Each structure stands twice: as structure tokens, then as C-alpha cells.
Image (spheres, rainbow, N blue to C red):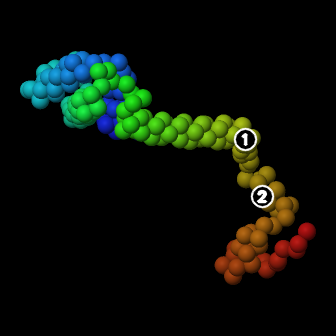
Amino acid sequence: MWSAEDVARASVRRQSEGLSVAQVAEAQRRERETRQQLDSPAVDRGPYDGDPEDLAEQWVARHTEWRRVAALMDAQDWPLYSPQRDVQGSTWARERDAQREGALARRAAWQTERQDARNELKAQVWLSADVSRWLRARSPPTPALSRSRSSPNSPTGSTWTPTAP
């Protein structure tokens, strides 16, 4: 549901709150080193190893976001990063929150619909051929049944029409 950029923006926004310019630069350097490690020849990372392409995409997005935060702090001359002052980051966070709220509302509606479907009474009755024929013979005909009985290809050949109740 979330793109790598969305996840990176939210993660960096949380992690960078209150960091100084030097700490943001350090985080940016660590992200770059991690990206370089991902580019190195494959190393077995154990049974919980993710898809290398997905990991690379996530790390590129995180590095891009750290660079954006560092550039913003330099341009605005902020001694500490504050997510509330980051206009672009706040816009992305609001969009992500709205998207999450919409997804939660859709899921709640779907769960309610499923619960309503579970609460419905459903009965299936299996009858023997004799009982089924006996019931059909005594039940009022439906329009579809009357059309089939009045068709020339009908096995009984009867031509009767239903009457309105």
C-alpha cells in the first residue's frame, strides 16, 4: 500500500526530529554506506533476507529523504530539525495520514459487510427426487417456469399460463 518513498519519508521524519545539522549529516552518511553495502556482492543475510531490489529501493528513498532534510536545514539555517516547520514533509505526512484513514475506513466497511453476511441465515435443504417432484407439482409456477412449460420444446407439451395472485 505504501511506496518506498512514503515509508522513507515517515521514517526519516520520525528519526530526525530534534537532530542537529551534524547528526543529520551523520545519518545521511550511514544511509550512503548502507546503500554501498547493498551494492556489494551478495552476502547471505540469513533466513530473513529481503528482496535485494526492494531493499535497494527503500534505502535509495531513505537516502534521498535524508538529503532533502539536510538541504532544507542548510537552506533555512535551522540548528535542529523540526517536522512541524518542514512544510513539504508536513504535507506528505498529512497526505499519508489521509490515505491511511481512507484505507482504515474501507477496511472497516468491508469488515462490517462481512459480518452482516455472516449474520444472514442461509439454509440449504437437500430433498430426494420424489419429494422434490411432489413439491414442484404443488407449488405455484414462476414466470420462468411457465415460459419453459409453454415452449414448443417442452417435454410435457402443456400450454398453460400463470394467473396473477
| 21, 139: nearer the viewer | 21
When asked about the image quadrant of residue 30, the answer is: top left
Q: Earlier in the sequence, mark 2 or mark 1?
A: 1
| 27, 88: nearer the viewer | 88
Q: Residue at x 85, y 64 (%)?
A: 140
Amino acid, disc 2: Arg
**Does the image show residue 58?**
no
Tag 1's secondary structure?
loop
Amino acid, disc 1: Glu
Q: Residue at x 73, y 75 (%)?
A: 147
Which residue is at the far bottom? 152
Estimate the x, y position of residue 134 in percent, counting from the top left.
82, 57
Which residue is at the far left? 41
Residue located beneath label 2 in the image: 133
Estimate the x, y position of residue 158 in percent, counting from the top left.
78, 77
Which numbered mark, 2 or 1, is in the foreground of this view? Answer: 1
Are discs 2 and 1 less than 8 Å apart at CB? no
Quick one: label 2, few (<14), some, or many (20+) residues within 10 Å?
few
When asked about the image quadrant of residue 15, the answer is: top left
| Residue 159 shown left or right of residue 17 in the figure | right
Q: Residue at x 69, y 82 (%)?
A: 152
Residue located beneath label 1 in the image: 120
